[in-house]
Image: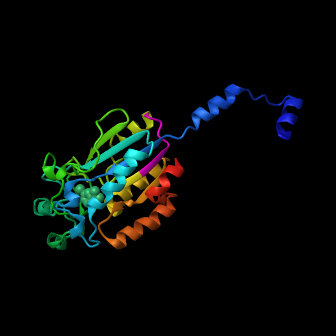
Amino acid sequence: MKFFLICTLIGIISIDANTFTTVSHRTKNVFALLIIDVQYCFINGSLALSNSPAQHNGADVIPSINHLIQTAPFDVITYSLDWHPVNHISFIDNLHDRREYLTDEKHQTSKVFDKVTYTGPKHETEQVLWPTHCVENTKEAQLHDDLIHLPESPNVIYIRKGTDPDIDSYSAFADNNRNHMTPLHKKLQSQNVTHVFVTGLALDYCVGSTAIDAALFNYKTYVIEDACRGVDQRSINARYTQFLDYGIQVVHSNEVMDIM
Ligand code: VGL
Ligand code: ZN
């Protein structure tokens, strides 16, 4: 009060109602829910999390995500789908066909979850080898039927990623080498999104990479831990440490309403 009086008295500054309107408009919080890869391939398909080291049940995320969709006032909802051609670089079944690009002959005998380095055909890239999963236009690649699907609109966004045979993309924002962006960032910007809440599968891969990219693109980023499941407890723990470094907050779904 004193400050305003002094300012007014000495005539340095004048604040009117318009100034406040402009400021409050500019800082309006706009909330998006990002639902990552809640597809059959990760739930009961070829890359079912129940068969991976942490033995999680991917379907366990669905009730929490549905509850959030139904109760929390998100301005934007985004669904991502891992969507690979059958000759995709991430599939261990394609290792032999790409052997000319392996940096190390020993990599020819690699197993699922091993990391190899490919020198081509587009560029050098490190790649974890996965079973064939989420092949475009298969039943496996569909979102789980129990997940609430809203029809596409300017504030309901669907993103397919990993669609180039030679490029893998864990993040819903960009490929693993950050050479190409998906349309997600532009679409969120066009809705003036400021805050994102990340959920889905798998926490240590696609959820983790999406959350980190969101933080790098300056969204206030939250990971809703009970709405995520992962592949391997060690890499899950490593992600939680990384989230701290990027200022990403890990929250429970029952805290979300208080944040919004
Ligand atoms: C994913 C491994 C391979 C994921 C996608 O959605 O987390 N993980 N492709
Ligand atoms: Zn994939």
Between 203 and 68, the one lying in front of the other is 68
In the rendered view, tell whether residue 162 sits above or below residue 246: above
Q: How many marks?
A: 0
Q: Is residue 74 visible?
A: yes
Left/right placement of residue 95 relative to residue 60 reads: left
In the rendered view, tell whether residue 91 sits above or below residue 85: below
Q: Locate the N terminus and report the quarter of the image it occupies.
A: top right
Between 13 and 230, the one lying in front of the other is 230
In the rendered view, tell whether residue 147 sits above or below residue 98: above
Q: Is residue 125 visible?
A: no
The colour scheme used to paint the residues is rainbow
Q: Quadrant of residue 17?
A: top right
In the rendered view, tell whether residue 43 sits above or below residue 67: below
Left/right placement of residue 195 relative to residue 234 reads: right
- Locate ligand 1 by image quadrant: bottom left
Q: In which quarter of the image is residue 62?
A: bottom left
- Which residue is depicted at the point 47% across and 51% down? 216
Between 84 and 99, the one lying in front of the other is 84
Q: Where is residue 43 in the image (x, y as percent from the top left)?
A: 22, 60
- Which residue is depicted at the point 58% across and 38% down? 27
| Chain part drawn in magenta | 191-197
User: Is 192 in the magenta?
Assistant: yes
Q: Where is residue 10 in the image (x, y as percent from the top left)?
A: 89, 31
Between 209 and 45, the one lying in front of the other is 45
Q: Where is residue 87 in the image (x, y as percent from the top left)?
A: 13, 53
User: Is 223 in the magenta?
Assistant: no
- Which residue is depicted at the point 16% across and 47% down? 136
Q: Position of residue 163 (x, y in %)?
A: 22, 47
Left/right placement of residue 224 relative to residue 137 reads: right
